Amino acid sequence: MVKVITRFKPQFITIGVLAIIIALLLFMTGYPGFIERFYSKGFYLFICHILHPVFSIFPFSVGDVVYICLIIYGLWALMQIIRLIFKKQFSQLSQLLLKLVIIVQVIFATFYLFWGLNYFRPSAAKRLALQDTSYAFDDVKAVTAMLIDSTNASKAVLTAADTLQTNAQIYDHAEQAINAMPAISKNFPAIHPKVKPSVLSFALNYMATSGYFDPFTGEAQIDYQMPYFLRPFVACHEMSHQMGFGAEDEADFAGFITGISSHDHLLRYSTYYAATSEFMRTVGRRDTVAFKLLRMRISKPVLADYKTDRLYWKSFEGKAGILSGILYDHFLKANNQPHGLATYNRMIRLCMAWYRKGQRL
């Protein structure tokens, strides 16, 4: 045993040091006030000033490339483990396993250090003074009707030029909208915002995922293949994660405020479309009669987009999407979002509190 420890002493020391770092990071998650002051408004912003400009240089997703390399390395390591077991080369096997432990530790520590601690800061409701969530279901129906009217109106003003925007134009308009947010509130720190098309869009389709934020590189990425009217809001949602909004409902809300504050017609329509979808789902779960009445209020062009939206994702339905949903649900629950995937739907509470403060929707 002593010989083993002596032989792999550098690896054990590295594992020990990384274990201490991880323990400290996990300890910090119990102190949201500390995280807010020293991490979210301190160290994390410093990280943003480094990562965002650097990775913005690349027109492709560096994070996607890294993930592809990690997958390839993982498959290679698995084959090596099997080979070493069969050949009974246990010394080399131990060395490889220790190396894999270190890699996992580095990934875990980097995740929380570079972005993950934002999951444990005080809620956006507290930071934005939107804690008054006492509203009746009738209020939800009234706001849903308002959002439907805004969706119809924003759809009606779209021109051919708006609907034919290239992905580059869509990204640029979303980035401009994010850059304008600090003027609205200091709680929206836009530091070199950038959104990119994901190299793995074909895989995202099958996982029913419209976009994701890479916490290791700070890159916001979207599925560039989905219907054009979905892309602008998803871009704002993912860049909201760049601003430190960790929880999915908070990123949805930040993306919503960003979108409706923009002067770009397509972005505004995309935002109202997404908000109407969210509110209609909530109404449908509570009152099917009210849902049907509100649906009759939606204009035919908007309903046509809902059909396009539904059919697009339906064409990729499969077990991969179900599996990824289960895994992501557990990931969210492990990172201070006990409602899992249902967290996305909780954006309504923030919108209702925003509305009760007299803010426009």
Image (tube, grey):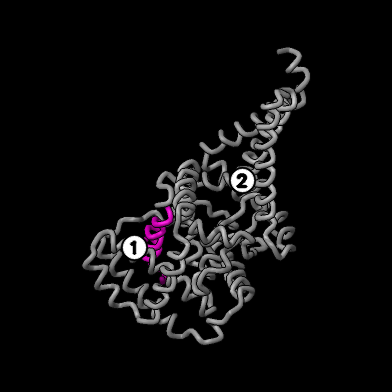
Disc number at residue 39?
A: 2
Is 148 placed above or below 42 here?
below
Q: Position of residue 19 (x, y in %)?
A: 64, 30
Is 79 placed above or below 88 here?
below
Say which residue appears at 46% left-offset and 85% top-offset. Answer: 157
Is 213 placed above or below 279 here?
above
User: Furthest-front residue in view?
Assistant: 86
Q: Position of residue 13 (x, y in %)?
A: 73, 25
Q: Residue 318 lies in magenta, yes or no? A: no
Q: Is residue 150 left or right of residue 216?
A: left
The magenta stretch is 343-361
Disc 2 crowd, CA 10 A, few/some/many (<14, 14-19, 20+): many
Amino acid identity at mark 1: Arg
Q: What residue did someone put label 1 on?
A: 281
Q: Nearer the viewer, residue 334 or 26?
A: 334
Say which residue appears at 65% left-offset and 35% top-offset. Answer: 105
Say which residue appears at 72% left-offset and 58% top-offset. Answer: 55
Disc number at residue 71?
A: none
Q: Quadrant of residue 309?
A: bottom left
Q: Quadrant of residue 194?
A: bottom right
Q: How many marks?
A: 2
Disc 1 crowd, CA 10 A, few/some/many (<14, 14-19, 20+): few
Q: Is residue 90 left or right of residue 180?
A: right
